[in-house]
Image (cartoon, coloured by chain):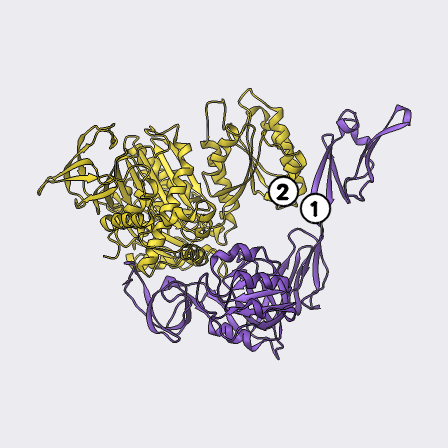
Amino acid sequence: MYIPTTTHVLPLVTIRRDRILPRPGEVLVQEGDRVEATTIVARADSVARHYIYDLTQRLQAPAADVEKYVKVPPGEIVEKGDPLAVRPITLGLSKLQVLAPANGTMVDVINGRLLFAASGADVELRAGFAGVVASIAPDHGVTLETSGALVQGVWGSGRLSYGIMRTMTVAPDQPIQSATLDEGSKGMILVGGTADQKSLRVAETVKVRGVILGSIPASLIPTTRALSYPVVITESFGGGPMNETAWTLLSSHDGREAMLDGRSADRWSGRRPELVIPLPSPGSPPMPTDGAPLVVGRRVRVLRRPHLGAVGVIQQLLERPHTLPSGAQLPVAYVEMEGLGTELVPLVNLEVFE
Amino acid sequence: MTTAPTDSILAVDIGNVTTRVALFDIVSGDFRFVAQGEARTTAEPPFANIEEGLHHALEELQRVTGRAFVDANDRLIIPTGPDGNGADAFAAAASAGEPLRVAVVGLMPNVSVASAQRVATSTYAIVSEVLGLGDRRREAQRLDALLAAKPEVVIITGGTENGSQSAVLRLAETVAIASRRLPDGSRPEILFAGNNAVQEKIKELFDGLSEVLIADNLRPELDSELLVPARRQLAWLYEHIRLASLGGYTDLSQWGTGGITPTATAIGNVIRFLSEATGDKGILGVDVGSMSTVLAASFGNDLALTVQPDVGVGHSAARLLSHTKLDHLSRWLPEDFSDDEVRNYLYNKSLAPATVPHELRELYLEHALARQCLQIAASAARPSWSNKAQVSYGGLMPPFDTIIGSGAVLARAPRPGQAALMMIDGLQPLGVTSLTLDAHGALPVVGAAAMQNPIAAVQVLQSSSFPGLGLVVSLVGEARPGQNVVRVKLAPAHGEAVEVKVPFGSLEVLRLPPGQEAKLAIQPLRGFDAGFGSGVSKTMTITGGEVGVIIDARGRPIAFPANPDKRREAVSKWCAKLGEYGV
């Protein structure tokens, strides 16, 4: 029994996603609360940088004595210029002192050295999609739930965003043309077959919120990573058009609000680049299921040339290994591919696609 | 480790892509590899439990052997029952998971820091930050860098015995401050392997913050290095931090008595046992994985173990471009490929690491990738061999008696000659070297079994389960392309002798079937060394292999024609001669 990876492109499912702070902080919502994409659900402070002051040198005092000159207890928040340690000298007429170099926190005095943490920008986690707070991990984050459409990608350039979807091409194999990008694209998540460097950069200037494509060449990865919005691809690098299922689903929801998560896939949490379209649902639709084995009738996608990206249904699993054109001998399946007929594909080159 | 007599060993290796189980049993008085089962590793979601994949692999093994290994309660049947089910011993190795993030803290960059880095590269670890005396950053900057690196382990070393104490303690203090700044559960473990005189002070420094493991000083004297104790401690930390985080680890670790050994450690052990068992000959074991590449070089009991944690043919394929230029990969391709095609292939392979080449053109790419992984790993490992190996030529490989190649990309090469060519091109051995292929992907599991019974492991390695590919005779020297540089005569015990002259820039193969003996006479031209000295001839008795005798007259390092068309033509000839691509 071979259990491959699964990619979901589903019109209506229950979607649960975690929003976890990179360091402990404050959760700002309650279980059961309704949230919008823009709702800040958790916040944590951050440290921009540390400062270490050798008080024995700065105060010209032995290490055993310096603590008595410290004016601020550990953990206290101070403003730039506040005195942290002061030693009067020349009968109190003058003083040696250490002032806070920035807004921040007095951490501690360790072996005669004062440690100070300058505050950085707060980390704020936004919901990213409209839904309900399903559960809370105190000080760490929340799990959000919504019903809606789910399109999983294979790669993302980084960042998470949300906006109104706008289909930019008439077919899933066509490139987004830079000439079609204008002020009307501002705040939008663009959908297209592919894109070149110029159109990705023009999209930056007109302030789009994200781009989801079938494929881009791998040479564009550095360009996409430098953009202020996420780029997600659904197929492969240098590959063919966006799969018809995803294309039809995305096109049919043109104008709806969606979340585009371009953060890279994480093997250990199961996170994938994805697009989520929150949709009203009369009941509670099922959750997507992963871990299905390859069996006859299973819908699959091919992960390797010559049929890279082709979607089909398993017709037969052969018991004996088959010799491929490369010379490799492997277990294979007959797959009836949409528009391509039936082809033999090694099991290890298939993923469940449903 | 025990060497108690056992009749059968069930060994498991859990890789990033594949989980393998293998059964070893006594056949005609010697241990033999009996059968194996494999399944996809299930360490990641949705299963997030390595036992799922293990059970699938065991089901396959049971199908092949007719022998059950777990009872109705999912417990290992041990020892073998009267019905023949179960096994007498169990051993497990694993490499699944991300590499450990390690920071290295030492004094002198080329002394203690270099030694600590060598310890770090002995397991699946990425050195994410280095602090040393040569560091010009202010202490607060070093602190911020350490916090940003998020190390899971900090190796602190420095100070020879009776040497510096205060400098080591000063650097360790920065680490302690970093530990204080991290929340509970995120603090790094400390491995101290420096001046023994400050051990207690180091423990005090981290009291209540982090666990401190102590190992012998890596540099007891400036000119001596002691890596083994620290290497063992780091392997222990890898198991207890990384492997222990895998779902199902706790249950699996209770199946046997030896816990779960890091795969690299298991491979290193079996290569060392083999070297000791063959009269301290130089043995090199290579394992090209999806995520990482392991090189274990042993000269007697002196083992140098090097793991390149982000050099591999699957998950790490795209990261290759941070180690090497695209051209260095493309030069191994016998057909014209655009840079875009090669780059797209690398990134797509990282996205779908378990996939295999369907077309011949993609096989070329996959095998070029494997060659380059081996070359990067060998270059990184070479400095750690310098004290152990007899180095004949600076910058080249030391001579090894035997190279054992492991990993799916080698084992699943459609032709044995392709595996041999990848090993020769990637490692570029010198002199006369036997090549052995781990055709069943069993080296890690044999290594795991070696933890239970080293003799059994050596017997298995010397059995037909590890087919000999043959011998490669590699010549060092320079000549103009086409000039004959060596004359070779192969006289089989049965059959006609064959004599060839091999021109510079080419490969020649003389077929000699496995098990068949022959006399091999090698007469290099003056200025060419086949491992016996420049221009020195030698005749030896050899045994055949799946490929036979390979004469590599391409020079070291391999000389590529500068013109792209001529380079492709040359690579195409090498592939055709040895690799039988497309046949």
User: Residue B378's x, y, as percent?
Assistant: 38, 39
Q: Quadrant of residue A69?
A: top right
Chain letter, purple in picture: A
Chain letter tied to yellow:
B
Chain letter, disc 2 residue: B
Residue B293 visible in this rendered orientation of the protein: yes
Residue found at x 25% / y 28%: B534
Q: Position of residue A78 (x, y in %)?
A: 80, 44
In the picture of the structure, the residue carrying the numbered disc 2 is B147
Residues behind callouts 2 and 1 on a single chain = no
**What kind of element bears circle 2?**
helix
Q: Is residue B280 above or below residue A199?
A: above
Whether the residues at callouts 2 and 1 have beta carbons within 8 Å, the answer is yes
Displayed quadrant of residue B274: top left
Residue at x-position 64% and y-position 52%: A22
Residue B85 placement: quadrant: bottom left
At label 1, the amino acid type is Val
Whether residue B74 is visible here, answered yes or no, is: no
Determine which residue is flagged by label 1: A47
Chain containing mark 1:
A
User: Does residue A273 lie above or below B267 as drawn?
Assistant: below
Q: Amino acid at mark 2?
A: Leu
